[in-house]
Amino acid sequence: MPGNAGTEQTTTVIIGTGLSGLAVAAELCRRGVDSIVVDGLDLLGAAQPANTASLQRCDAADSVNLRERNEILRHLRNYAASHDVDVRNTTRAIQLTMVNGGSPLASAPQWEVHTPTGILVADHIVLTRCAHSQLRRMVNDFGMAVGRNLTAAMRAIGIYLVGVGELITPSPKEVLRQAKTVGQAISARVHPESVAYPATGSFAALSC
């Protein structure tokens, strides 16, 4: 069961401390958006425990991309350390719950990410490890019509996907592209009056 040590508020919770998670965290940091990165997601559920489902890992790199992936990951870890990005490698998300009355029709639902030591409350969730079939079931559990566009259905309730491939794992450059796109989308919601921040520094050079 999730712990009750305390509740923390943040703008975005990123689930996954690998390449995809760190890429999004770095992008949000550059754009002035708060985030907390936690490791993995063992169980994903709606309001009722019966709606939980195990998620598959989709982040394994093949031999062709391994060297490039490791180099990018090294840069991202250095960036996270030097910019005090809140990365909690030993904290696992074990349940995801829609709050604000649990209504999928709310204009801006909030989310509770339950961990063994407490609850993280956020406006946006980024998932980096999952299977598309399970994501579709989850969206249905929250009362949303998925249709053909799973990504759009999930964004409508504040959930974003990075590094999640329907059939194969995206390349490191594709992960960076997705992270930049998601970072822009979340930043636009958090700072609607602001123009997108220009890409600067060493992380910008990693973007494709």
Image: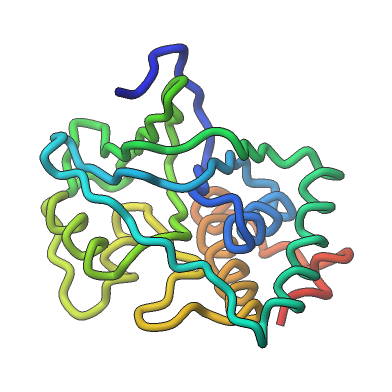
Residue 29 image offset from top left, x and y in percent: 71, 49
- Residue 146 % position (x, y): 17, 68
Q: Is residue 28 left or right of residue 101?
A: right
Q: Nearer the viewer, residue 129 or 191?
A: 129
Residue at figure coordinates x 22%, y 50% from the top left = 53
Pinpoint residue 151: horizontal percent, then vertical percent: 34, 70
* View extreme (bottom): residue: 64
**Percent x, y for residue 142?**
16, 49
Nearest the eye: 184 or 176: 176
Q: Is 134 situated above or below 25? A: below
Can you say which quadrant of the picture contains the N terminus? top left
Left or right: where 193 falls relative to 73: left
Colour pattern of the rendering: rainbow
Identity of the residue drawn at 59% across and 75% down: 61
The answer to whether residue 1 is above or below residue 193 is: above
Q: How many marks?
A: 0
Where is 190 relative to 98, above or below? below
| Left or right relative to 152: residue 13 | right
Answer above or below: position of 163 versus 192: below
- 126, 134: nearer the viewer: 134
Quarter of the image holding residue 139? bottom left
* Residue at screen point 53% across, 65% down: 182
Residue ranking furthest to the front: 63
Direction top: furthest residue:
5
The quadrant of the picture occupied by the C terminus is bottom right
Q: Residue at x 81, y 65 (%)?
A: 203
